[in-house]
Amino acid sequence: MAGAAALIAVLTVLARLAGFGRTAVFTWVVEGSDLGGMYVIANTVPNIIFEIVAGGALASLVVPLLAGPVAAGDRRAVAATTGALLTWTVTLLVPLAALVALFADPIVAVISDGRSPAELAAGARMLRVFAPQLPLYGIGIVLTGVLQAHRRFAWPVVAPLLSSLTVVVVYLVFGATQGRDASIAQVSRAGELVLSGGTTLGVVVLSLSLLVPLRRLGLAWRPGYAFPADARARVGGLAVAGAVTVTAQQLALVVILNRVSGGPTGSPQVYNLAQTMYLLPWAVLAVPLAVAAYPGLSAAAATGDVAGYRSTVAATTRGVLLCSFLGAAALVGTAEPVGRFFPLGAEPTAAAIAGFAPGLVGYGLFAVLSRALYARGATRAATAAITTGWLVVPLVAVPLAALLPRADRVLAVTLANSVGMLVLGVLLVGAVSRSAGRAALAGAGRAALAGLLAALLAAPAGVLTARLLADGGTPTTAGALVQGMLSGAVVGVLFLAVAWLVDRRDVGPLLTGVRRRLGGRRPAGAPQDGVPRDAGDGKETLSP
């Protein structure tokens, strides 16, 4: 599992760097224009609607449904389940995409705040082009789950890289033809279509590129609505759990976008950049560990391997805690130089990034513990914890946005997000303890203490480094890049040093796993750094 997590992490770094590059290019092209703000709002709508209707259900369904048949070598059941998932996905989401296109005008009007008629009209036009993303997202999630259930981890990470590169080209073409910082009044309809259509093309690449590795699996799947008997018994509970929790998440996002939309011009772009930075350490540090563990957790739960399940949950949770605290420290320590990449809002961007940071710990726990609960069928416990955490976000965001100045609107919603994610993480810890026993969280307290102490020392050191390098002046973009890299290095070195002193038992295996993945192959039969194997059979397929 450590090797799989390291591979996923390395590929995710490349994919997220491309994603950050995409955001940076977008920010450079549109800066603080009204077109950029409406683009962010309209492009978020398909994500919100998809996640509410199908995304959460699909994400929670695929791996648990397939892990048992894959482990048993029942290819007929795997093919039938895959075919049913894809058929239901297309059947539900294609008509939904048509409805989104039909009602684009009122949808954009509801989610926006304080926008002019011209801005709302542009947002609706772009949303009609974005609507086909709905079934494409669904297909992508199903294919990703099928590949992960077979322990094919590479392509699901490479696909976002290809998508980001596609969209970067689109942004550059748009900038070359329409000019930088083009407003809605200035941009041509053809230019607007390049922006919206090219973005949807990126989703086509994201989802349909996964057909390449799926074909290599040799699954003889066919369209059909019927699930195998075993899958049919589980599909309802998992689907409801995923749908309820993600609905709460997307309701929180709707409130966030509404509050951000009412902030100063450029606030949606500031939020978009800050969120990109927030998701970077989560995707690079926490998610690879959780994703690598998920097939093994599902297989252990399906076969009744209680000891294997508990040890895998415990080891993965400790690793995720350490990585999440490291990510939070890095966000705070590098926030100021990163903010300089957004020329019209460096200070708000830095504040927003720092506001997101505490919530990274809770969101990291969500990545692993939600999967742990879904794998053993504890859907009600997972649903209650996750839903509560996400509903806390708007409950905090609305009053906080009213209390803070309008200029701090983005900071208000990022702080609210952190409060909700910390609540979510604590509730998930309690749910796993009750469901699987305290042994499933063995050593988590030690890892959390090590991560907290290390973060409290490393984050201020990163901030101090950036300020000393700035020497009271405003750095250029190149200077900000250097400051960010050096600040990040200081954070990383100091964090690992402190965490090593407090929790060498858990820090050591993480570093060893990464070194072995980057530096050479593991000797045949060698243990995986004290981390339990996924299925207890020594099989860990890392090929794409």
Image (tube, grey):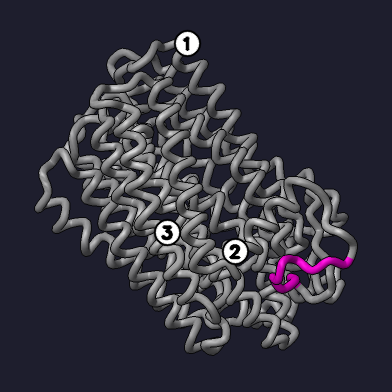
Q: Nearer the viewer, mark 2 or mark 1?
A: 2
Question: Taking 142 as reference, is 311 above or below it?
Answer: below
Look at the magenta stretch and give its main secondary structure: loop
User: How far is disc 1 from disc 3 in space, using C-alphas?
Assistant: 46 Å
Tell me the kind of residue under disc 1.
Ala
- Above-or-below relation of 185 to 454: above
Residue 454, disc: 3
Can residue 95 be seen here? The reply is yes
Q: Earlier in the sequence, mark 2 or mark 1?
A: 1
- Element assignment for label 2: helix
Tell me the distance, in whole angstroms, between the alpha carbons under discs 2 and 1.
41 Å
Q: Amino acid at mark 3?
A: Ala
**Label pair 2/3, CB-CB below 8 angstroms:** no
Compare residues 420 and 531 and report the one nearer the observer: 531
Q: Is residue 149 left or right of residue 187?
A: right
Q: Which residue is mark 2?
A: 290
Precedes in sequence: disc 2 or disc 3: 2
Amino acid type assigned to the residue bearing label 2 in the image: Ala
- Rendering coords of residue 314 (x, y %): 58, 76
Q: Residue at x 31, y 64 (%)?
A: 420
Q: Which residues are magenta?
A: 525-534
Q: Quadrant of residue 422?
A: bottom left
Q: Is residue 14 magenta?
A: no
Which callout, 1 or 3, points at the residue further toward the start of the chain?
1
